[in-house]
Image: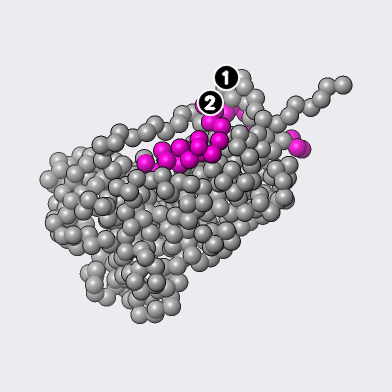
Amino acid sequence: MNRPRSRDFDVMIVGAGVIGTVMASLLVARKLCPAGRVAVIADRFAAASAGEADWDLRVFALSRASERLLKACGVWDLLPANRVFAYERMCVWDAGGTPSGSGSLTFDCAHIGEPNLGHIVDGRELQWRCLQSARALGVVLIEGSVEAVVAGDDEVMVRLRDGRELRSTLLAGADGTDSPIRELLGIDTAGHAYHQDALVAHVRTTEAHRNTAWQRFLNTGPVAFLPLNDGRSSIVWSVARARALQLRAMDPEDFNEALTAASGEALGQCTLTTPLAAFPLKLQYALHYARPRAVLLGDAAHVVHPLAGQGLNLGLLDCAVLAQVLEEAGSAANYGDYKILRRYERWRRSENLLAAAALDGLERLFSNSDGLSAGLRTAGLSAVARIPLMKLGLAQRALGLAGDVPEFLKAI
């Protein structure tokens, strides 16, 4: 009689970005899986950045909940101090007003009893340190492309293009916006394109950023300035695709003038210090987060507009919730149980859809140039500014300190 083949792993994760490697590290760090029983599968793995490299063009504004999660899996202390910057204030205002006038809203960490409002983190360093943490914890890294997924009663099998077959109790797809795992699982998506690109670069300004994140809402899309530790700011400027092409074709001096005008000169004259990059924007959400023996995480499950910088924070909360749900499952043998995975799906899908709808509504409201919308924008921002409890609630929500947050994050 042939004995059944033992599983290669307890959990396999496809995708070696921040979400995939954090999920892997969390499983081992929380003692949900022993070292060697979690695998990350990816086409390629991140390489270390050169020590003298500039800040990556992709930066992330990490919330307090994300900071705590990265501490829980050993990543936070690995991040180099010169690639992490705590910001203390955030100022948002409508193009029809000024940063300190009506139609503006300012959050200050001192007013909510927090040391800061979050951290700006270098994207390249974050990805590399997440990978290093996973390695140090004994996560198995497998280079290869998945071409088939077969879920059975007790295990899930993935077949790689080179013919290898690997088995585990649970498969997690953390392979990004165009997730092949989502497609192999037969999960559809909904949403819409914004027909916008986000232009990103680092700029120097004649006025100091004052440890403040600035965002001006124009009817063509928001422009944000995220403070860096060397006095520069990282910009995220969302504009229609045709306009993005025009801006990218400009010589640096003309672009500097266009950006300065778009910012309302809030930080004085802007000067590019890096090349420009562009990312297409869309709203996308998976209709399901779970299948028997499989789940989706991060951008594979949801993509939102970047105007509040919440995309990665939402994905990291996916990881935290899945870890808590699996901890309550009792043993690795139960990790792929559909009833357990459905709890993760209900918890995170409702939270993520709420965030996506709110961000989509803000994008629509602030991109509308009619008089009624302009009046609503000014009145809404002014009302929040005048109501301390509402303002506190919004700040706590953005920090990940309010809402349905996993218990273990509250204790860190």
Could you say whether the residue bearing mark 1 is in a helix, strand or loop? loop
**What number is the disc on residue 288?**
none
Which residue is the site of mark 2? 144
**Amino acid, disc 1:** Asp
Q: Residues within 10 Å of mark 1 (few under 14, many from 20)?
A: few
Q: Residue at x 50, y 37 (%)?
A: 136
Tell me: 17 left or right of 231.
right
Q: Residues within 10 Å of mark 2 (few under 14, many from 20)?
A: some
Residue 161 in picture, x, y percent from top left: 57, 22
State the residue in front, 67 or 234: 67
Q: Residue at x 47, y 50 (%)?
A: 70
Magenta segment = 125-154
Tell me: 375 left or right of 336.
left
State the residue in front, 29 or 88: 29
Which residue is the site of mark 1? 162
54 in the magenta segment:
no
Q: Decide: marks 1, 2 in contact (CB < 8 A)? A: yes
Residue 286 in picture, x, y percent from top left: 56, 47
128 in the magenta segment:
yes
Q: Residue at x 42, y 73 (%)?
A: 392
State the residue in front, 32 or 346: 32
Does residue 93 sit above or below 347 in this rendering?
A: below
Residue 60 in picture, x, y percent from top left: 37, 50
Could you say whether the residue bearing mark 2 is in a helix, strand or loop? loop
Judge whether residue 3 can be spotted in this image. yes
Looking at the rendered image, the quarter that the N terminus falls into is: top right
What residue occupies the far right of the structure in this picture? 1
Tell me: 364 left or right of 331.
left
